[in-house]
Amino acid sequence: MSVEYRDAKVETRDGLVRIFSSVENKSGEAWRPSEGFAFGYHIFDPETDTLVVDGTRAVPSGDIAAGESTAVSLEFRMPKEPGRYRIVVSPLMEHGGWYYEKGWPFLLIDAVVDARGAHLEPVRTATSASLGRARAIRALGRAFTLPAAVVWNNWSLIRTLTRRDILGRYRGSIGGVAWTALTPLLLMLTYFFVFGIVLESKFGNDPSRSGYVLYFLAGMLPWLAFSEAVGRAPTLMLEYRNFVKKLVFPVETLPVNLVASGLVTQVFAVVLFLAGLLAARGSVPASALWMPVLLIPQILLTLGLCWFLAALGVFVRDLGQLIGFLLTLWFFLTPICYEETKLPAMALPLLGKNPIFILVRAYRLILLDGRAPEWAAMWKLWVASAAVFVAGHAWFYKLRKSFADMI
């Protein structure tokens, strides 16, 4: 250890902060003020690690030999702006750098400034390494809690924006909100006409068109909400540029709104599908109750990708066109409008890892075959979707401060 602090304390009086400590030189070399040695303090914004104040120096009255101690006293005022601050007290060498940046121990005080003044926590000794470990642990915890907190804390706003998005999409049209149900219905009918009537596609040993229709539409259910949200995500920040430029608006809720709007479309599609299933087969299997188990990873996956693409779309303006092409390719690489058996055997192990492929198969199992989802595939989908969810939010959170400058 190169320095040791004893009896460190901090107090505030008349708006001034005073820090006292006895400091022992354990570096093995003399500390010489004539060569630029001194004690000083830095005040940081702990959220961004931005240096706010580079404070005045406290210069010892004489040299401090190895093994000797000296009393250090610093006095200063905290910044007036409300917020959290972090005070670092450390030896330094003028024109040679701060010793805390070289791994030496330093005094650390966390503080909060509000309308009543500065409130300081007890002083403690720390190192850059110990702070780095604490920061990594805190960042890891926040990576898992912040995405969920975004939805929980802003649920009322998300609900309002989702309603506004759905109503605004069809404002002025003759059908109005009815298009929320008509859109998935017409889309399903279009694909059915192409693949079921024109191409005369059949499902397995079932020669009837109703068998193929049910098989096809069951696969379309997760794809509708997923493709709608992901397709709009790259241009989302540009679409809501007025909100993005408002400093107090939680822009991370915009992709959530996008996913929620897609889920509304899926809800209508599921209702239409179950009505058709009841008409064709006379009943709906009890295994349909497994649907929430499928919806949760679907939502996590979609939202994670939307966060990622919404942030990236601010910097790559061609991303919207590229995603449109990739979604088309993704659709035809997923056995939605054809049987899984028609996929090349050599490519099946790779294509089988497609998360939408897993969802499509699971929807068909619970809605058409009356069986539970395949757990071997589902737990992997849950883990992968949660990872995408966390990583997508972390990416968005890291880049969001640049949005207003880029738009």
Image: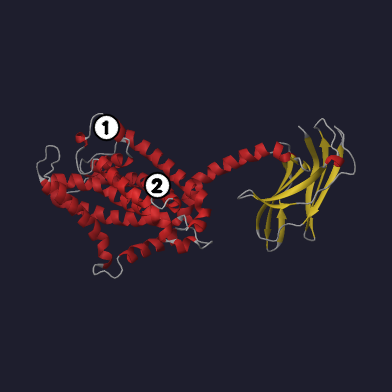
Above or below residue 357? Residue 18 is below
In the displayed structure, does residue 160 sit left or right of residue 103?
A: left
**Position in image of residue 237 (x %, y %):** 43, 57
For the residue pair 379 and 230, the one nearer the viewer reads as: 230
Q: How is this picture coloured?
A: secondary structure
Quadrant of the image for the N terminus?
top right
**Position in image of residue 218 (x %, y %):** 23, 46
For the residue pair 382 and 51, the one nearer the viewer reads as: 51
In the displayed structure, does residue 336 sit left or right of residue 51?
A: left
Above or below residue 343? Residue 332 is below
Q: Mark 1 points at which residue?
A: 348
The residue carrying pointer 2 sits among few (fewer than 14), some (14 to 19) or many (20 or more) residues within 10 Å by Cα, namely many
Above or below residue 300? Residue 102 is above
Q: Which amino acid does label 1 sit on?
A: Leu
The residue carrying pointer 1 sits among few (fewer than 14), some (14 to 19) or many (20 or more) residues within 10 Å by Cα, namely some
Q: Which residue is drawn at 39% across and 42% down?
A: 385
Spot the residue most to the right.
62
Circle on res. 305 = 2
**Position in image of residue 384 (x %, y %):** 40, 39
Q: How far apart are marks 1 and 2 (CA)?
A: 24 Å
- Quadrant assignment, res 82: bottom right
Kindly tell me whether residue 367 is visible in this rendering: yes
